[in-house]
Image: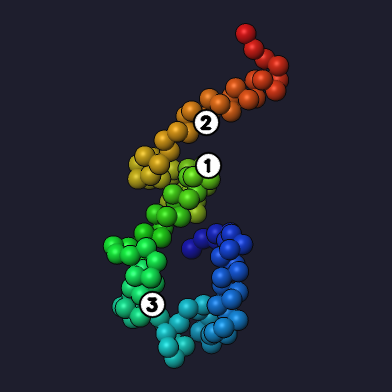
Amino acid sequence: MRTVHLPTVAVSALTRHLEIHGPSTTGFVFTGRNGGTLRAANFRYRVWAKAVERSVGQPCRFHDLRHTHVAMLIAAEQSPSVIAKRLGHVSVRTVLDVYGHLYEGLDERAADALDDLTNRWGVGF
């Protein structure tokens, strides 16, 4: 288990969900039709498959949301350490091994950032 801070867009979506469906007696945010445990097979058939069809189309697995999350964090230039903690990995190595190809262009941006910094400091040759 871990604590992960949610972006405002996710908090808003969860708030709206709870306004529509109300709190459950089980403590879960998402439940089955009668308020009980949400079964994976039912969720895939009743909710996930329809949502995928209406949006990105097949193939799209639920686990792909995790990969999208990482890709968005990398695009936002978050550190591998932050990403690893959000995913529950004990090491940044997994993040770099699996998602390292998404870090393309960061080296050039790092050089540009050093140029900007040295220009602000008045350091130059």
Q: Nearer the viewer, mark 1 or mark 2?
A: 2
Quarter residue 37 falls in: bottom left
Q: Which amino acid does label 2 sit on?
A: Arg
Q: Position of residue 85 (x, y in %)?
A: 50, 51
Q: Residue 109 carries which label?
A: 2
Whether tag 1 and tag 2 are in contact, CB under 8 A, the answer is yes
Q: Where is residue 114 in the image (x, y as percent from the top left)?
A: 59, 24
Question: Which residue is drawn at the image coordinates 38% and 44% (left, top)?
Answer: 99
Q: What residue type is labelled 1?
A: Glu
Q: Nearer the viewer, residue 107 or 5?
A: 107
Q: Give the residue number, with chain letter if any, for mark 3.
A: 47
Q: Give the residue number, with chain letter if any, for mark 1.
A: 77
Q: Residue 62 carries which label?
A: none
Of the numbered discs 1 and 2, the one sitting upstream in the chain is 1
Q: Given the current orientation, which residue lies at the most extreme top position? A: 125
Question: Which residue is drawn at the image coordinates 59% and 76% (left, top)?
Answer: 16
Of the numbered discs 3 and 1, the one sitting upstream in the chain is 3
